Image (cartoon, rainbow, N blue to C red):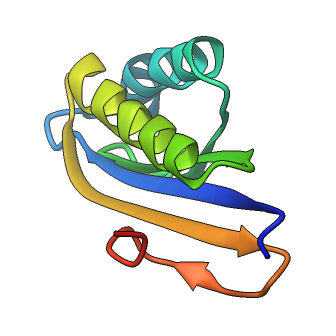
Amino acid sequence: MALGYVGVLTVRLEMPWVSNLKEKRALVRPVVERLKVRFPLTVARLDGLDAHDWEVIGVATISNDYQWVEETLKMAADYIAAEGPYRVAEESVEITVLGDGEELDEDDEE
């Protein structure tokens, strides 16, 4: 029996028109900070920190309710896509079961 679920969302953002790191941080950082306030999530800038035209954001949450984890990550993904003047180039969701060693894809729970 599962103790709970850990959900991780990774999102690659692209901003090909941005020409420097300061400008990119001004676009990405506010969205990261608002996500932390608006949703019960841990959020981090994971990759592309030295690139001026792209970045990967990671979002994680944990709960004993699979559906809640799934819905929370979906709301976070929708929020990220709607909030910034960038393009979401790639999005990935993984939900891991705690306690029995299984990993579920989005399609496995249905």
Q: Quadrant of residue 71?
A: top left
The percent position of residue 30, horizontal first and vertical second, equals: 49, 14
Judge left or right: residue 47 versus residue 98: left
Judge left or right: residue 102 versus residue 106: right
Judge left or right: residue 83 versus residue 74: left
Q: Foreground: 73 or 37?
A: 73
Residue 84 in the image: above or below residue 58 = above
Q: Residue at x 43, y 76 (%)?
A: 105
Q: Quadrant of the C terminus?
A: bottom left
Q: Foreground: 10 or 1?
A: 1
Residue 49 in view, yes or no: no
Q: Residue furthest front?
A: 1
Residue 36 in the image: above or below residue 38 = below
Q: Foreground: 44 or 103?
A: 103
Q: Quadrant of residue 7?
A: bottom right
Residue 66 in the image: above or below residue 38 = below
Q: Residue at x 49, y 36 (%)?
A: 72
Q: Residue at x 21, y 32 (%)?
A: 86
The percent position of residue 79, horizontal first and vertical second, equals: 34, 25
Q: Quadrant of the N terminus?
A: bottom right
Judge left or right: residue 81 versus residue 47: left
The percent position of residue 11, horizontal first and vertical second, equals: 39, 51
The percent position of residue 109, horizontal first and vertical second, equals: 42, 70
